[in-house]
């Protein structure tokens, strides 16, 4: 009796399963045109999104000098157009109610994910802010936290800096925005300083006039700029001075080159005019002691 009951229960379950599958098959056949239409709509909107993204990036946004801004706007356009195609496709399939429930659940899930990914979201928001900042652009030469190099990329996660030694440094956006940075590329002119010292026997006015003239002849000073010269201290073996002047500079290599040139010129003209650049000299006075060593003192007898 139990075997017959089990047999009938299995047959009933199988019959219900086949009826369910048959119903799904009928629904699939009936909705097949809508499914095909939805697939075609999504495909069409995908290519439309790609085309509009490239069009905005290469044509309409070409006047924007910030490459990162063009990248972000083009990606946002791609996502928005793709979402429009998705909503239209779900409408064709008659999944409006299902979509409403999915969006409601996604809101709750999104809140939980947002709390769990605060650091990542902070980097994303900082990346958007950096992309729209006019004070930092791709290929700018910057210095941040003892890291110098060219801005190679700004994305929604981090900023990539290409150092002069060929290596890349990747800094999270949130960490980068928390610290001050120096952008050498914002101004084409910067003031540098060169220091030196002359002997105490030197004519100080002659030294000042000579250094000022040498710098003026070799480094152009524009309106509002000028050469500054100051004696700074009485050193141990020299009277020290510093001169400051303006040069074309958008990166540290140009600063090193200008300082290198100025030092060579000052040294050359000091030598031609017999101006001494002293260096510290230490004299060691060894007193002569009557030192005698009795070699036989510790020698044992026969």
Image (cartoon, rainbow, N blue to C red):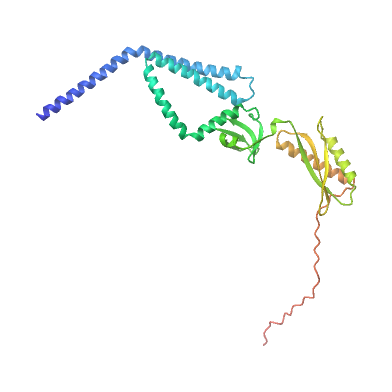
Indicate the quadrant where residue 42 lies. Answer: top left
Q: Residue at 23% of width from left, 18% of height from top?
A: 19
The residue lying furthest to the bottom in this view is 302
Percent of width and height locating residue 154: 59, 30
Q: Residue at 14% of width from left, 28% of height from top?
A: 6
Of the pair 207 and 166, the residue shown nearer to us: 207
Q: From this viewpoint, is residue 102 visible? A: yes
Count of marks placed on residues? 0
Q: Quadrant of the C terminus?
A: bottom right
Query: Does 165 sit left or right of 110 as displayed?
Result: right
Percent of width and height locating residue 73: 56, 22
Percent of width and height locating residue 246: 78, 35
Indicate the quadrant where residue 213 lies. Answer: top right
Above or below 238: residue 52: above
The residue lying furthest to the left in this view is 1
Percent of width and height locating residue 139: 65, 30
Of the pair 113 and 90, the residue shown nearer to us: 113
Q: From this viewpoint, is residue 272 visible? A: no
Query: Does 171 sit left or right of 17 as displayed?
Result: right
Above or below 75: residue 253: below
Q: Quadrant of the N terminus?
A: top left
Of the pair 186 and 160, the residue shown nearer to us: 186
Above or below 63: residue 218: below
């Amino acid at each position: 009796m139990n075997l017959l009951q089990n047999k009938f229960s299995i047959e009933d379950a199988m019959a219900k399963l086949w009826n369910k599958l048959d119903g799904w098959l009928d629904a699939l056949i009936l909705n097949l045109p809508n499914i095909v239409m939805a697939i075609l709509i999504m495909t069409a909107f995908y290519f439309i999104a790609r085309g509009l993204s490239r069009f905005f990036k290469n044509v309409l946004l070409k006047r924007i000098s910030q490459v990162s801004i063009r990248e972000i706007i083009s990606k946002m356009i791609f996502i928005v157009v793709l979402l429009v195609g998705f909503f239209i496709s779900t409408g064709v399939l008659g999944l409006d109610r299902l979509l409403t429930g999915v969006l409601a659940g996604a809101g709750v899930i999104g809140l939980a994910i947002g709390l769990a990914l605060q650091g990542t979201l902070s980097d994303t928001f900082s990346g958007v802010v950096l992309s729209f900042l006019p004070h930092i652009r791709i290929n700018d030469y910057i210095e941040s936290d003892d890291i110098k190099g060219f801005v190679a990329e700004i994305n929604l996660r981090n900023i990539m800096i290409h150092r002069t030694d060929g290596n890349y440094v990747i800094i999270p956006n949130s960490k980068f925005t928390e610290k001050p940075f120096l952008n050498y590329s914002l101004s084409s002119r910067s003031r540098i300083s060169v220091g030196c010292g002359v002997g105490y026997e030197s004519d100080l006015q002659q030294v000042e006039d000579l250094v000022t003239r040498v710098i003026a002849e070799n480094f152009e000073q524009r309106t509002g700029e000028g050469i500054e010269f100051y004696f700074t201290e009485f050193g141990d073996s020299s009277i020290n001075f510093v001169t400051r002047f303006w040069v074309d500079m958008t990166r540290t290599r140009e600063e090193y080159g200008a300082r290198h040139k100025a030092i060579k010129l000052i040294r050359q003209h000091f030598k031609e005019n017999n101006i001494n650049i002293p260096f510290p000299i230490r004299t060691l006075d060894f007193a002569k002691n009557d030192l005698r060593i009795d070699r036989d003192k510790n020698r044992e007898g026969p």
